[in-house]
Every structure is written in C-alpha cells, then in structure tokens.
Amino acid sequence: MSEYIFKSVFADDIQEFISLKRAVGFKYDSEQGMLQRVDTYFADNNVTVREITKEISDGWCRKRSYETLANQSSRISVMRVFSKYLNDIGVPAYIPVEGTSRKKHQYNAHVYTKDELRRFFAAVDASKSVPSECPYRGQIMPVFFRILYTSGMRVSELRLARICDINFDNAYIIVKGGKNQKDRIVPIHPSLAEKCRELKSSIHKCSPDYEYFFMQYPGKPMTLGCVYKNFRRYLRKAGIAHTGHGPRVHDFRHTFCVNLLLKWSKEGKDLMAYLPYMRTMLGHEGFEETAYYLKLTADAYPFIRESLQRSFPYIIEEVTFDDRDYY
C-alpha cells in the first residue's frame, strides 16, 4: 500500500499507532485505509485539539444511509481501538461502547453444488484475455479459481503468491505472512501444479522469481476488485443467481472444507484426529475457527449430523465466523 500522509491534528498519533500494530505482527493494511478516512473526518470537521469528544465519536459512528451494518461495525471498531490507544498514551478520547451498531445478520455460507461448479468452471474456461485491461485473464483465471476451490486458500494468499512460492515438482504453495503473520505450506493437486508450470512457461518466460505468479501486469498482482469483478462475471455467465447475500468468492473456501469433512466422514475417519490437519492447512489460529465448518457440514448434510454430534457435542450448535478471514 502506498504511504499516506496524515493531515489531521492526530496525524502523528495515527502513524505511531499503525507502526506499533505492525511492530507486534499485524499487517494493518486495510485498517490503515480506514484510519485514512478517520483522519480525513477529523480534518473535515475542524478538530484542532487532540481530544476525541463523544460528539465527534458519535458523528463518525453514525450509520450512513448507503452502507451495510458490517461496514459500520468495521468503522466503529477502528475508532474504538484507536481511542483506547489514545487513552493509554494520555490523550482524552471517548471510546464507543460495545454494541453501538446493531448485530449484523449472520451470513449463510453458500456450498456450491456439483452442477454449479461445473457451470462456473465452464464459464471460467471460456474466459478471454483483453490486452488493454486483462492481458492474462484467459490463461490465469482457470488455474486461479481451481486452486482457490481445491486448496481452501484465502483469496489474497493466492493472488499475492510469487513464482518462488510455488513448488511445481512437489505440488505445494508456500503462504508467506498469512493471517496472524504465519507461514504455511498448502498442498495443491498435481494436475494443478502442472497447470502452474505451463502457465509459468507461457506468461513468465522472463519474469524474476519474485514476480507475482497471478499477475495483472508485470509487477502488479491481481487486485481484490479484479478477482471479484471476474467472479461476478462468471456467475452471470454460468446462470448462478447472485444476491446481496452471495454467493461470494470465499464460499469456495467454505465448499472445500465442507466437502473435505464430508469425505472424511464417509470414509469413517476419526475427525478428532484429522481436524488438526484441516486447521493447519487453512491457517487457523484457534480450534473455534475450524469448528465453524463442523456446524456448516452438519447443516448441509443432515445425514452425518449424528456422527458429528457424537464427536463434537458442544460445537454443532452455534458457531460464528469472521467475514474478513477470507481475504
């Protein structure tokens, strides 16, 4: 992310706050973007004293007519954490109370059916490159979305992978600096490793090893906007209805996990023994993140609910997930 010059009376505080967060291991890229908006808000409202009053805080936290509750909650969260930091360093700041925004609607994850996947990938495979806008789309997207679906990787983990992160011979991708700043190895299907080798020979003939593998242009990775725009395009061509509630790109991660758990369950595997493998593969920090997929699998396939209930009696009731986990 290009460096932003903060302009409000809190400019130094914001910059030091971001530096502190990064020093303890957080990327703080999306949060920096939100803090840029906070900085602009302070400046536009003529805040000239290093103090965040309740009035100023409430003005920031108030829901905009055009935004979702999820976005409002994200804005409030950033303000709350920054205000706590200011209090810690002796700067008076009103801290928004918990629950300032209404509880957001729990998103119901979409598990793709075999027919939906068939139609989606048929649309992806028919994709054409546009030299002026997406010069490599026709070559990249079929590989990108197949790895996304069959590996359970987060979107940005895959789109930011570099050539040197892909082991073509042993069929795996090294995720560097993933969520919680942890590296991990993610296996991919050998046939996709071969497709990656072919893609490298096609579009990376002269690329250095540090080049983004799924580049939009040399030196520039695909943006989230590019991925999402093409995803919506493929859904439309596949005849898969999209509403404001999905399907979403990260539903490929949901589908991967549900199908893997279903496969293990049908094979009679001991899920207590196998779940740590899934947790590691997905890059989860705690068991509760992985537990979400147990409930999702039980809901999608009631016929295995009983076996899951026996192994995880206290988990199959109600588990939530963080929507931001998938990007």
Image: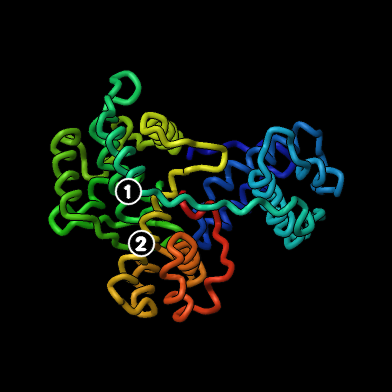
How far is the residue under mark 1 from the one under mark 2?
A: 32 Å
Q: Nearer the viewer, residue 315 or 168?
A: 315
Residue at the location (80% across, 53% down)? 93
Q: Which mark is residue 183?
A: 2
Q: Position of residue 271 (x, y in %)?
A: 37, 76
Coordinates of residue 182 in the picture (x, y in percent)? 40, 63
Q: Is residue 84 left or right of residue 267?
A: right
Residue 231 figure quarter? top left
Query: Which residue corresponds to mark 1?
Result: 114
For residue 169, what is the image quadrant?
Answer: bottom left
Amino acid type, residue under disc 1 in the picture: Lys
Identify the residue shown where x is 32% and y is 26%: 134
Q: Nearer the viewer, mark 1 or mark 2?
A: 1
Q: Secondary structure at mark 1?
A: helix
Q: Secondary structure at mark 2?
A: loop
Residue type, label 2: Asp
Q: Is residue 13 visible?
A: no
**Which residue is drawn at the image coordinates 46% and 65% (left, top)?**
302
Q: State the image coordinates of residue 308 (x, y, percent, origin top left).
A: 44, 74
- Say how the picture is coloured: rainbow
